[in-house]
Image (tube, rainbow, N blue to C red):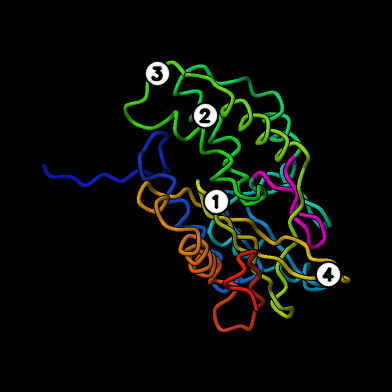
Amino acid sequence: MDCHYEFLRMPFGIMNSGAALTRAVKKLLCGMDNVVDYIDDLLIYTETWEAHVKTLSELFKRLQVANFTVRPVKCLLGSRTVDFSGHSLDRGAINLQDENVEKVRNAPRPKIKREVRAFLGLVGYYKEFVPNFAAVSAPFSDLARKGQPNIVNWGDSQERAYNSLKVAVTTKPVLQLPDVNKKFVLRTDASDRGLGAALMQENEGTLFPVAYASKKLTDRERKYPVTEREALAIVWGVKKFSLYLYGTVFILQTDHVLYSF
């Protein structure tokens, strides 16, 4: 007899289980623009306490209808600061989560390619907090390339990169949340190894970073003259932060004299 069987619950180990959960949560939260989801974690943000209570009430109703449950011990309600997806959010600022900072601080020097990739993955998760991350980490990414020996050839450039990345992350840099009502400032730069861009906004007379971005140059791009590399940095930076800059008037800052006026 031909039969059709369906799971009543999602079993562990199914390849598309994460995608199925994400789809279900996205459907559940449809229309709730002030609720962010990351797999099974939900983050609610509002400007007032009244709006927060209203959003919570609507969310709980939807969870109940969908037969989803939440564990009270894993809920943090009405807090001004919260840890979410490896970041600490606090009144308009984004910080690094303390436990992840400690992981970087205690990370040993890589000895084989697998450990190099693991270290790059650890610090790379916070690359938006590190200026010129691609150029700084280039000595490590070179070691992880295909064709390189499995045993790491540790030299002065790797030691400098290792120390620089650790210092950059463990000093707990802070990013400011973007304010669409304020003008953005985009700073770009190019070196012989990579491109860098910093999106910034002014707060009480001081420029604060919103996000950093960087890109390692290809072998072909490294042969560009300085003027063309600086132009490439500008074009790439504008595209990288187009979500914030598109349709707005912003200030572009570069240290290349030919593009200054």
Q: Residue at x 31, y 46 (%)?
A: 6
Task: Determine the image quadrant of residue 165.
Answer: top right
x, y (%) of residue 11? 40, 37
Badge 2 marks a residue whose secondary structure is: helix
- Which of label 3 and label 1 is nearer to you? 1
Find the magenta span and give its range: 86-97
Mark 1 or mark 2, whichever is nearer to me: 1
Q: Which mark is residue 118?
A: 2
Per the image, the residue denoted by label 3 is 150
Is residue 39 inside the magenta stretch? no
Identify the residue at image location x=61%, y=25%: 159
Q: Residues within 10 Å of mark 1 (few under 14, many from 20)?
A: some
50 displayed left or right of 116: right
**Going from the N terminus, do you reach mark 2 or mark 4 first?**
2
Residue at the disc numbered 1: 191
Residue type at numbered disc 3:
Asn
**Quarter of the rendering containing residue 167:** top right
Residue at numbered disc 4 = 203
Which secondary structure dominates the residues rendered in magenta? strand
